[in-house]
Image: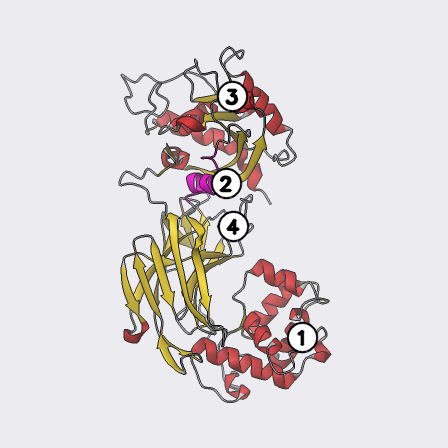
Amino acid sequence: MPDDTDAEGVIRALDKVGVDFSIAKSALIDFLGNAEFTPYPAMSGALLNLLNSRGLKRPVFIDVIVFNYEHSPGEPSPRRVEDVDIGILQAAVLEGFNERYAQQESAFSGLLKPLDVPQPPVPPVQTLAMTAEGTVSVQGGVTLVDTDNPRVEVTAKLITVNSEAAHAMVPQELHRENNGWRFTNGDVRLSVSNGEADAGLRPVRAGSLSDDALAWPTVDGTFSGATGAEVRLQSRIRVGYRPVDVKLLVEGPKGFAANSAAQGRIALDPEVLLVPVEVARFFSDAIPVSNISMTGQMALWDQVPIINETTNFRSIDGGTGELRLAERKWDVWPVPDVHGLYTHLGWESPDSIWGRAKVRFRLVNYIDVKTDNVHAAPVAGDGTDDRRLRENNDALSAHPQHISDKRVVKVIFMHRIAPPEAEQVGQALIGNGCVGIAAGASNGADIAHEIGHLITGSQTHTDPQKQPDNVMNHPGPGTTITDEQVGQAREWAKNFADFWAH
């Protein structure tokens, strides 16, 4: 057995004997490193001892095994390998196997690989059953995409599953209407793991969207396991240069069901240059700038869907503890238009415009900064037009949450960035790598336009007569860029490569 401090080694060893996991990998690593308060280290050691000579013929989730073991009579929770009851452990594995594959195996021995019989090689991870938006190529089993926030689609076949509450086999049923959906007798999601980092409640530097990305049907309709219906599911995730493992997980009432588990590996194409963005909202008690929020900014920069807690719940049977249904509704589901432009809160996302140069933007930090009224909305006669913005930039640079060890693009939202008599709704502070945006006057390509000033290193504009839809026009920036601007954007974006270095 690997050293018990080597969680990654334990996970690899378990995988070789047919024990995988359905919880977040980051959580499993934490559990395996905590022998005092969790049974995972002891149970992992016992499983490796038990299965070392003959692995399982089909994988069983370790978190399900641990759950079954701890909910056996007497509620044991071992902390040492020698405290693990092998009989209870075998029964926990058997129960997890039968739940996952809808089988009726009665003996633990029936789960093991045959003795002295050559086993077929494990097939490589396939990406054919799963499609990702913006796919450029598939190399070494990894799907490379040209966007850091692709929509992922995968097909699942619904089945009937056992329900103790109903005393019968019941069909999984999935219904979607507009932005809402319900999964009866189960639930479904995409597991996203093994990337550069996992995003939590706030954005992180290079993370995927989350450990579990909600998956929902691509079209309206009702689909039932009673007829073995196949349903196309979709989700949105965030990817970086290191491949993430993406796997469809389908539940039944008492754990994971035997639905086909399509999986793939997805990464950002190395040709795409990813630019880190730090957003700060400057507000006061009187001027809350309430239309700017972390969830809204993730939706703007990274097309992350927004779901309200009140429209996201799971119903559990009080008697058996079985999952009866999961019901959800998106507040925002990002969808680009027919021209590939994606708009949120009135702004076209910078990805939509500068993405044509294979330059993408990743929100890596969000900070709320409470200030006074004049720094949330400069007043008439308040000095030079950009004085308050520059002072806010200085305050942001000194903020303890500011990313100071790596270069980032700073985006400051205020109610106004200049006095009322000034025309600006946006301003670029070129030497500071910062743009200011008036949150009270959202308008099309303004954010992409101000970033364009950082890209070109100039406050000059293009001629609307010669280039009527160029992003650098003033007033009224458009949504196109020239070949020259493509080259400028790519050279500028290379300055941020160090942010993603490991």
Which residue does the numbered mark 2 point to in the structure image?
294
- Mark 4 residue crowding within 10 angstroms, few (<14) / some (14–19) / many (20+): many
The image's mark for residue 430 is 3
In the displayed structure, 495 sits above or below 76; it is above
In the displayed structure, 140 sits above or below 109; it is above
Query: The C terminus appears in which quarter of the rendering?
Result: top right
224 left or right, relative to 265:
left
The image's mark for residue 77 is 1
403 left or right, relative to 123:
right
Instruction: Tell me where residue 441 sits by quadrant.
Output: top left
Which residue does the numbered mark 4 point to in the structure image?
242
Q: Residue 255's x, y, as percent? A: 48, 72
Q: Residue 286's x, y, as percent? A: 52, 28
Marks 3/1: CA–CA distance: 59 Å
- What range of the chain is rendered magenta? 290-303
Asked if one can make out residue 140 in the rendered structure from this viewpoint, the answer is no
Give the number of the mark in front: 1 or 4.
1
Q: Residue 182's x, y, as percent? A: 36, 62
Marks 3/2: CA–CA distance: 25 Å
Marks 2/4: CA–CA distance: 25 Å
